[in-house]
Image (cartoon, helix red, strand yellow):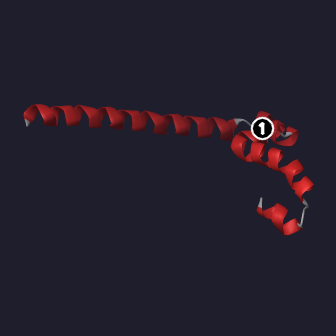
């Protein structure tokens, strides 16, 4: 939106560009997968993506285990008190 203001677009041009820009910002990083060159790069060399997915899964499991431990400890403290 700041770029539109800096470029000096008129109101009609701003309305034309506002919807696609808002869509792209709402979509986030997933929008990159729609670009053919990036998609081909991921498909041709999947090892970094697989590494990232494994690390993310490990972190999610650790977070879940820590949450379970927290709940168990808080229940135990309530029983003791």
Q: Residue at x 89, y 48 (%)?
A: 16
Residue shown at the point (40%, 33%) measured from the top left: 64
Tally the marks.
1
Q: Is residue 9 left or right of residue 50?
A: right
Q: Nearer the viewer, residue 61 or 75?
A: 75
**Left/right of residue 56 with respect to residue 68 in the rendered view:** right
Q: Looking at this rendering, what residue extends furthest in the left direction?
A: 81
Q: Quadrant of the C terminus?
A: top left
Q: Quadrant of the N terminus?
A: bottom right
- Tell me the SS state at disc 1: helix
User: Of 25 and 17, which appears nearest the observer?
Assistant: 17
Residue shown at the point (28%, 37%) measured from the top left: 70
- Across and down, in percent, residue 50 comes to 64, 35
As displayed, is residue 79 above or below residue 10? Answer: above
Q: Is residue 12 above or below residue 34?
A: below
Q: Give the quadrant of residue 66.
A: top left
Residue at the (41%, 38%) spot, across then down: 63
Are there few (<14), some (14-19), or many (20+) residues within 10 Å of tag 1?
few
Between 31 and 5, the one lying in front of the other is: 5
Tell me where residue 20 appears, x and y as whole percent. 82, 45
In the image: residue 78, left or right of residue 48: left
Q: Quadrant of residue 41?
A: top right
Tell me if 48 is positioned left or right of 70 in this view: right
What is the x, y in percent for residue 45? Answer: 76, 38
**Residue 49 position in % (x across, y down):** 67, 38
- State the residue position of label 1: 33
From the viewer's side, name the closer residue of 38 and 81.
81
């Amino acid at each position: 939106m700041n770029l539109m203001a800096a470029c000096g677009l008129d109101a009609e041009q701003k309305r034309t560009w506002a919807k696609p820009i808002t869509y792209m910002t709402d979509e986030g990083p997933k929008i990159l997968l729609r670009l053919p060159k990036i998609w081909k790069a991921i498909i041709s060399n999947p090892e970094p993506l697989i590494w990232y997915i494994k690390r993310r899964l490990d972190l999610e499991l650790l977070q879940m285990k820590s949450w379970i431990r927290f709940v168990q400890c808080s229940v135990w403290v309530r029983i003791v008190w």
